[in-house]
Image (tube, grey):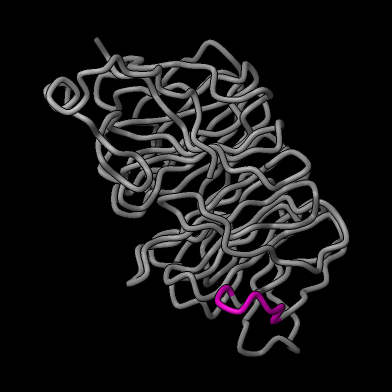
Amino acid sequence: MAMRQTPLTCSGHTRPVVDLAFSGITPFGYFLISACKDGKPMLRQGDTGDWIGTFVGHKGAVWGATLNTDATKAATAAADFTAKVWDAVSGAEVLTLAHKHIVKSVNFTKDSNCLLTGGNDKVLRIYDLSKPEEAPQEIPGHTASIKKALWCHDEQHILSASEDRTVRLWDRNTLEVVKTLSFDTSVSNMEYLADGDVVLITYGKTIAFYNAHSLDLIKTIDTPANIHSASLHPEKDFVVAGGDDFKLYKYDYSTMEELESYKGHFGPVHSVRFSPDGELYASGSEDGTLRLWQTAVGKTYGLWKCVLPEDLVSENPEPLLPVPAEIKA
């Protein structure tokens, strides 16, 4: 009999959780940041969901959040027309970058020296964080709000997804479009997997995978519901996705076969991301919670403890109580 998923539920937010991002693996483990419409992005220990701190300073909903690789800096994108850069160790605000409209997306370069932003004013911006007084480089071209903007190819290119139903690949040096993908509906989310050189794009009920250099289509997965977010396992074993029907779906990347589906939240799922080690994935929802899920159910990892059937018999002659449906983190 297959073991049942027992998610770790992370409470604390008071409004919908709309974006999630993990750091890389550091000497202190890895970390998770959440963006929420309550305007208070939170930092957590990635493998347990334990709350570390809240970044206080935005005056509106926070739509996007990210951490740099070593989890020393955080950046957030908000409805107060600003992006902010934070010291992720002390929680102190480092910079406020004023924009002309709501900011939806933030992404650091690998060296953390530059920040890429995008939002409702349809313009991509590149800030040199060592020279915050200087005006950013601006890249116009989209005709509607930018939902996601990511560095790719060692920061030689930029990927942007917009409400104008396009994903565009830009040359970092010339600031010109290299290639445009057009869709028949708005793109809901996008993920770039550097090691696998794959771009994952969700739109409607479709999860699509593209070659990150050519933007040639590799494959698609059709799902039962509108999908808001999906994530590819770091070793390209699995794909997880969530959307309108409150469920989380897990697929085999090679065969595209659905492996699991279960009701994950009490509202639509807005964001799904795999951890950097691939051992778990996080989901954020309209219900105001984050949940952490095991990639391999039953494995001892983080707060999950595996008990083998023979151990249960030898150590617990008394009948076992049912496993609780959730573990609160």
Q: Position of residue 249 (x, y in %)?
A: 45, 21
In which quarter of the view is residue 300 placed?
Answer: top left
Horizontal placement of 315 versus 9: left or right?
left
x, y percent for residue 298: 27, 30
Residue 315, image x and y in percent? 17, 28
Q: In front here: 203 or 216?
A: 203
Tally of marks: 0
Residue ID at (50%, 61%) = 151
Please name whichever residue, 183 or 75, is drawn nearer the observer in this view of the structure.
75
Q: Is residue 286 magenta?
A: no
The residue located at (33%, 34%) in the rendering is: 295
**321 shown above or below 186:** above
Depicted 264 relative to depicted 295: above or below: above
Q: Nearer the viewer, residue 133 or 122?
A: 133
In the picture, residue 56 is in which quadrant? bottom right
- The secondary structure that most of the magenta stretch takes on is loop
In the rendering, at what x and y percent does residue 47 appear? Answer: 40, 51
Looking at the picture, tell me which residue is in the foreground, 13 or 151: 13
Range covered by the magenta-colored residues: 88-94
Q: Is residue 196 above or below residue 2?
A: below
The residue drawn where x is 48% and y is 26% is 207
In the rendered structure, the answer to whether residue 238 lies left or right of residue 209 reads left
Q: Residue at x 49, y 28 (%)?
A: 241
